[in-house]
Image (spheres, rainbow, N blue to C red):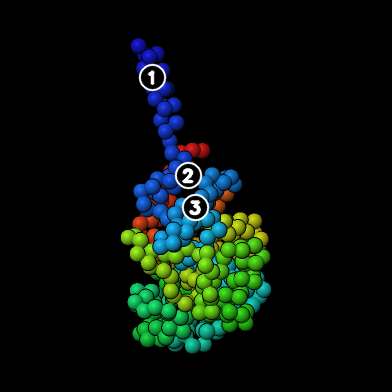
Amino acid sequence: MTRILVASGFILLILFACKRKTEKEVVLDFYEKGKLNGTVLIVKEGKVVCDTALGYKSFEDKLPLTKDTPFCIASISKPFTAAAIMLLQQEHLLSYDDKAIRYVPDLPVYAQNVSIRQLLNHTSGLADYENVLMVNRKITNDDVLDFLKKQSGLRFPSGSQFEYSNSAYIVLGRIIETVSGQSYKRFIQDKIFTPLKMRHSFVYDAETIPPADRAKAYDADKKPDDYYLLTTGDGSIYSTTGDLYKFDQALRKHQLLNDENSKEMYKLPALKDGKPGQYGFGWYVSDQAVMHTGGVNGFRSIMWRDLGANTCVIALSSMGDAFPVYKFLDEEKKVLKRNK
């Protein structure tokens, strides 16, 4: 009897193992339930386990997505802005502890002691413009700087707390332009996209003529909700999963940043309460993994990178809150761990 029970249990374990979802099956499940309209690339320990495009670039025209369709990656632009600042530091053109007002003299007086480092790790105390200005269309960096001038002061003493601020990365974008003598768009193109052969990536600004093959965005009910902002630095980049993977690999292999900056990027600041912050230079940092999400209008995105295992999950979607980025990542991480 005992042998029969052991054998039956063994068979059940085999059947359970056979029914385990793969990484791609999780993606298909989200798509079939109407939660995903986009592209997904999952790499496990250096091996591609899912690389797919599901849905449409345009629901009106029924144009199918491809792996090379650019999506607005929203705040996943911030790691690129941070990398650009680090490239300038490597050329000895700035220091992380320089005051931002040195390069952006029209910052308000209350921000005179905010450092570049504090802008990078979201401890600056600068008020976030997003919830105030987003009611208007075609917002520019100048609009954000005007918004900062109208504030009564910092939200807290710089360096004492963590608080996510899109405004801080607008200021970083302006610093890049001041120091390099180039537009943000040209600097990112010349120093990151072109060297890494990210051929399907671009910065969207006032001078951009959107390519016809880009994804258009919608809300969860498939009503048009496309990207329209003109700010740069905080979330203006369009890219693909394949191009983002090139960026991931370049960071892992120190092709862009030297060894010192590759470590600096993931260091967490010490806050006033003695606890570490949540954010390094352009990335949320937790244990041996880093990540960033993006969300603006109908675009949603996530990029999660296991630094120790050469594993990453990249997903881009254009159907608003229909795509629950954190739930998707949690399910994929469980499958990645279970299928070792």
Image height of 263 relative to 333, above or below: below
Contact check, label 3 and label 2, Cβ < 8 Å: no
Image spot of residue 42 (x, y percent): 52, 49
The span from disc 2 to disc 1 (Cα, nearest Å) is 30 Å
Residue 284 in sight here: no
Corner quadrant of residue 148: bottom left
Residue mark closest to the camera, 3 vs 2:
3
Viewer-closest of 13 and 275: 13
Label 1: how many Cα within 10 Å (few below 14, some 14–19, many 20+)? few
Residue flagged by tag 3: what amino acid is it? Ala
Q: Is residue 269 left or right of residue 221?
A: right
Residue 24 badge: 2
Q: Give the labeled residue for mark 3.
A: 53
Q: Is residue 198 left or right of residue 238?
A: right
Q: Residue at x 42, y 27 (%)?
A: 15
Of the numbered discs 3 and 1, the one sitting upstream in the chain is 1
